[in-house]
Image (cartoon, coloured by chain):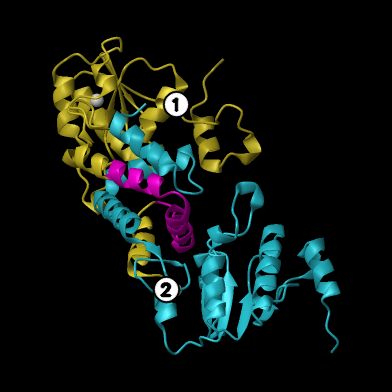
Chain colours: A cyan, B yellow
């Protein structure tokens, strides 16, 4: 409908999650009509990030540095290692503001159906880190999904074989959550995980 | 929070309309984790569009061609000229599928407060087109907003001085619209524009 360069821009914007044809059209026209500077800056940032961003050699998170800022932070406790699925999970954990250890980011979870095995989520790297002997407690914070639980169990077995203490973050009713809006699975878990007070 | 290249990518994604900090974060991580090819293609399309896309010399719409496809289409009627505010409006009109004339795109509307005067919306170009004498009817399809109406009135006065027939598209209750959900202003307009049947 529009000229080729504009049509191609619209179609390429669809690679962004949550952007359908209507939003892509609105974005393309907005950028061309009103913010070409922003568009050029976005293009350059995309190029630089695609080119430069790799994985931290210690924790596997996304970073353009050989070792990321958290791994490099000597004020953080090396003996506590928290395993999460994605870099966004690190951000969520950090927003809690109470964890002072380090992270290991799987960049996914075990998924045999999709051909994602232990090596694909860096478990060889994690294992050699546990074998090095500095980690005293491994905290498993994978998602409470079928795949996340399976991944946590698999990692727990490996870590216990190395005599590392393993824990799993608690799951249950969120603080401030109203029981009537919580799903049954969560409630069943909260009930079976009840603690005497 | 993330490394500089990732933080900059997140902030540059905010130039997209409707993208807040949370979506920008989700988009950046998604692209880096799962679609670097799409990200590279988007960067290249942005660059090419910013570099190549200008305005049609006849109708002012966005295009990388000197004259756009619609202006160049000799099967369309040159004597009917429809004035709209944006390229997206052309798309909306075309989706109606009944207009066979040509367009003139203002790329905005008169807005004295923002310093947008007649020359900024191409009225000099439009006037010389009317003076050339091929246009028999000028159809004003600016938005039914205060600025759109003011712009339509201004253009109507100029066109009438050139002895060109001027019309305004009808406004009222949309087909399939239920009266109880239509705003009062639209209903008042629909009432005062009633036609005898
Ligand atoms: Zn790291
Ligand atoms: Zn044109």
User: Do the dots labelled 1 and 2 sit on one chain?
Assistant: yes
- Residue pictured at 62% horizontal, 40% vertical: B181
- Residue pictured at 34% horizontal, 70% vertical: A65
In the image, is residue B156 part of the stretch drawn in magenta?
no
Give the label, 1 or 2, closer to the camera.
Answer: 2
Dividing the picture into quadrants, the one containing residue A110 is bottom right
Whole-percent x and y of residue B146?
37, 43
* Relative depth, front residue between B195 and B79: B79
Report whether residue A144 is seen: no
* Relative depth, front residue between A93 and B195: A93
Disc 2: host chain: B
Q: Is residue A190 left or right of residue A76?
A: right
CB atoms at circles 1 and 2 under 8 Å apart? Answer: no
Location of the N terminus of chain A by quadrant is top left
Whole-percent x and y of residue B123?
19, 33
Q: Which residue is mark 1?
A: B170
Instruction: Give the extent of the magenta segment.
Output: B17-46
Q: Is residue A23 left or right of residue B63?
A: right
**View extreme (top): residue:** B75
Q: Is residue A147 left or right of residue B169?
A: right
In the image, is residue B21 part of the stretch drawn in magenta?
yes
**What label does residue B1 carry, if any?**
2
Residue A71's place in the image compared with A43, above or below, is below
Q: Is mark 2 within 8 Å of ligand 1?
A: no
Residue A97's place in the image compared with B11, above or below, is below
> How many residues crowd around disc 2 within 10 Å: few (fewer than 14), some, or many (20 or more)?
few
Tell me the SS state at disc 2.
Answer: loop
> How many residues crowd around disc 1 within 10 Å: few (fewer than 14), some, or many (20 or more)?
few
* Relative depth, front residue between B105 and A112: A112
Indicate the quadrant of ligand 1 in the picture.
bottom left
Whole-percent x and y of residue A18?
51, 48
Whole-percent x and y of residue A70?
44, 79
């Amino acid at each position: 409908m529009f000229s080729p360069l504009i049509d191609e821009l619209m179609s390429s914007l669809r690679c962004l999650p949550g952007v359908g044809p209507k939003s892509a059209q609105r974005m393309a026209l907005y950028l061309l009509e009103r913010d070409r500077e922003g568009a050029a800056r976005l293009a350059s940032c995309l190029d630089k990030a695609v080119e430069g961003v790799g994985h931290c050699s210690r924790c596997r998170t996304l970073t353009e540095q050989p070792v990321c800022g958290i791994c490099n932070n000597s004020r953080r406790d090396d003996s506590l290692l928290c395993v999460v699925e994605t870099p966004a999970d690190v951000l969520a954990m950090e927003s809690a503001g109470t964890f002072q250890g380090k992270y290991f980011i799987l960049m996914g979870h075990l998924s045999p159906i999709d051909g994602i095995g232990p090596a694909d989520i860096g478990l060889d790297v994690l294992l050699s880190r546990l074998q090095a002997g500095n980690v005293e407690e491994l905290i498993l914070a994978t998602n409470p999904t079928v795949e996340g639980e399976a991944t946590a169990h698999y990692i727990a077995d490996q870590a216990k074989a190395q005599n590392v203490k393993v824990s799993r973050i608690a799951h249950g009713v969120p603080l401030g959550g109203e029981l009537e809006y919580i799903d049954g699975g969560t409630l069943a878990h909260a009930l079976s995980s009840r603690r005497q007070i």
